Each structure stands twice: as C-alpha cells, then as structure tokens.
Image (tube, helix red, strand yellow):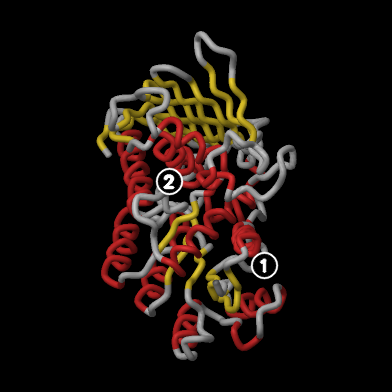
C-alpha cells in the first residue's frame, strides 16, 4: 500500500512531541510527511519546515494556509491526513477545520483543552465522516496489549483492584519554569486547559487502566494540588471505581523528586495479579498464590506471545523496544485503517473518540471532585 501523505501542525523548532510523531510515523513505514505548518509564528514555521527537509512550497506559515492550499492540489498530490502536535488549546480549531477540508486526523492527547472543545471535535468527526485517532502512546506497547488480552479477556477472573501511577520530577523546582518552552504551556491554563499534570500524564494513567481492564472509570474521588506560585495542578491522587465493580488508586505528579518518568500499573483479579512498568516495558509479570511467578518477555521469537502481538514487534528477543516503537504501532494501525478500513470486532490499535471522551470526562470529574473537597464524583 502507498504511504499516507500527511501534513503536520505544530512540532517546529524547540518542540519535543513533533519530532516523536515524525520518527514514529517513519518507523511505522506507512506514512510520508509532505507538508507542514510547524509553528504559530510564520517565519519560524517556514524555517522549521526547511530544517526538516520539507519542500519550500509545502512549508506553510499557518495551519489555515496549509489546509486551504493542500485541498486545492490534485487528489494524488495533496495530503490525506493531518497530525496535530500543538499545545492543547490549539487542538480543536485545526482538527475541526482539517476534517471539514476532507482530511483524516491523528492528534496528540488529551483530545482538547476542555470537554466542550472535545465534543466539538467529536461532532465534526461524526458530521464529516472523517477518521480521527488519539495517540495514547502506552497502549502501543506489545506487553500492554498482552495485558489487555489477559485481564479484559477474563483469564484471571474479575478485576478487584488497580493501582496506577505516573510520576515525574521535571517541574519540581521553581527554576524548572525558566526559559522552558515545554514547561511554559503545560503550566498555563490558557494553553493547557484547567488540568495540569492530571491532563498531561494523568490521562495516560487513566487510559491505561481502561485499556487493560476493558472497563470505564465510573466514579472518582480526587485531590489535586500545586506548588506555591503555580496556577494548575502539578500533583494529585485519586480513588476510583470501575464500571465492573473493581476499585483503584491513581497518582499523577510532575514534582515527585527522583522519578524521571515512572508509569507503573498493578491489576489484581480473582486469580492473579499483573504488573507492568514503562521503564522496563519488555517484561510483564504475573503472580499467583499457588504457582511460581511468570515473567513474559517481548521479542519476536517468543512463541507464547499471540500472533497479532508478535506482528507488531520489530526486534528479536533481548533487543529492547520502547517508546518510539509503541508510538509507531499507533501510527501503523491508524494508517492501515485509513487505507483498508476497520476490522470488525478488532482492537483498532489507537485511542478512539469514545476513549478520548472518557479521558476528558475523567479530567472534568477529577477537577470537580477536588474543587468540592475530594468528594465522589460521577464520570
């Protein structure tokens, strides 16, 4: 199949996630970057495009210009999809405009800066019939997919308790906000939305819970806090209840000193406990009362790994795969669906609008619960 021709919005000079998306799309092998509006500053947008090798005539000063001029090109030349890697407040306008112009969209999480804007994106997708994916990266790891098969598939019985944490320390000092582009928009409610750490990484933790268990978070009791001088949460914890009756705890913080990027999940079911940690993503441990512990390893030569999961692994056993490859699995799956359409009953391989809306409801409920004094709040 020919690669998906795509244009990128955001991700120019000084950005982090744009380069990740471009690398992941290249690893996936079924995407080709042909255009871009890589900054909200026209001169910087054009300089950024030239820097990464885009043709000058397809490096645009704004996303509106890109959509208009690309739509005017012949069908075999114009972009087919748009990757949006901007701060949260600039997700909805280009996503809606791109779908209205006839382009599919892949967008970084969370879906938007507010529930209202998220619903506007979802409405645009329904109205236009365009496909849209959200990059909840960690569901792209092979052993996370195996965890879902085991837990959501019922191999261990009902889910009793889940403990998930996503903790970092990169905003733990006042000076961390000085001349730091990545920090600046994340701590600014005008750009990030009303949620800080819970929006940036708490949504990943919540999505991981729902993905592995196959259940939605139904209620939450949250306390969100911030360091002096901050305007939105940089630390928080919550109790939650799952739709199937299980219970759990979730911690999301960017001020936990000594933890670089510690995402970890423990799922306890009737018959077994399952344990995965992003900093050691190529092992999945299963523990029972009356049997030795099982340690599952990623790797293309592991016969006990189901075929559909083997198909998304790229290296032999013992050669670690990680963040970029997981991201690439999301791009690969979305590209295949753009070309061939969805497979009935199959995991699409990326976060859908239902998943993204659940994440936005999680943020709304967490913020409301915390404001009300950590009371139980329905999603």
Between residue 195 and residue 288, name the one nearer to us. 288
Locate the N terminus by quadrant. bottom right
What mark, if any, has residue 184 been given in the picture? none
Residue at 57% across, 72% down? 3
Residue at mark 1 = 13
Q: Residue at x 65, y 76 (%)?
A: 49
Residue pushed farthest front?
Answer: 303
**Label 1 Cα crowd, 10 Å radius (few <14 / some 14-19 / many 20+):** some
- CB-based contact (under 8 Å), mark 1 and mark 2: no
62 or 179, which is in the foreground?
62
Q: Which residue in the protein does label 2 denote?
A: 195
For residue 37, side relative to residue 150 (left or right): right
Residue 202 is at least partly visible in this image: yes
Picture residue at 30% right of the left edge, 63% below the top: 120
Residue 354 sits above or below residue 44 on the image: above
Q: Residue furthest top?
A: 290
């Amino acid at each position: 199949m020919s690669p998906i021709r795509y244009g990128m919005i955001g991700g120019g000079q000084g950005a982090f996630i744009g380069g990740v998306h471009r690398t992941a799309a290249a690893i996936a092998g079924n995407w080709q970057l042909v255009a871009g509006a890589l900054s909200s500053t026209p001169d910087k947008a054009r300089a950024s495009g030239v820097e990464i090798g885009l043709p000058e005539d397809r490096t645009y000063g704004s996303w509106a210009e890109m959509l208009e001029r690309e739509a005017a090109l012949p069908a075999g030349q114009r972009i087919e999809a748009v990757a949006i890697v901007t701060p949260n407040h600039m997700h909805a306008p280009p996503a809606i405009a791109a779908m209205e112009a006839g382009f599919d969209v892949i967008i970084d999480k969370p879906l938007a800066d507010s529930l209202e804007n998220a619903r506007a994106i979802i409405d645009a997708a329904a109205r236009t019939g365009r496909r849209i994916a959200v990059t909840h990266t960690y569901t792209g790891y092979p052993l996370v997919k195996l965890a879902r098969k085991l837990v959501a598939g019922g191999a261990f019985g009902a889910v009793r308790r889940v403990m998930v944490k996503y903790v970092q320390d990169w905003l733990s000092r006042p000076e961390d906000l000085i001349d730091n582009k990545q920090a600046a928009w994340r701590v600014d409610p005008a750009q990030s939305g009303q949620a800080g750490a819970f929006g940036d990484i708490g949504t990943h933790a919540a999505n991981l819970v729902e993905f592995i268990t196959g259940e939605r978070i139904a209620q939450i009791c949250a306390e969100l806090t911030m360091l002096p001088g901050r305007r939105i949460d940089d630390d928080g914890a919550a109790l939650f209840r799952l739709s199937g009756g299980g219970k759990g705890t979730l911690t999301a913080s960017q001020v936990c000193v000594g933890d670089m990027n510690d995402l970890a999940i423990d799922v306890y079911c009737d018959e077994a406990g399952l344990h995965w940690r992003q900093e050691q993503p190529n092992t999945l441990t299963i523990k029972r009362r009356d049997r030795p512990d099982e340690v599952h390893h990623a790797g293309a030569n592991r016969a006990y790994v189901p075929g559909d999961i083997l198909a998304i692994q790229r290296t032999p056993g013992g050669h670690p795969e990680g963040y970029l490859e997981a991201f690439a699995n999301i791009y690969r799956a979305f590209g295949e669906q753009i070309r061939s359409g969805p497979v009935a009953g199959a995991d699409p391989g990326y976060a859908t609008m239902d998943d993204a809306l659940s994440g936005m409801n999680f943020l709304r409920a967490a913020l409301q619960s915390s404001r009300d004094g950590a009371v139980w709040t329905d999603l």
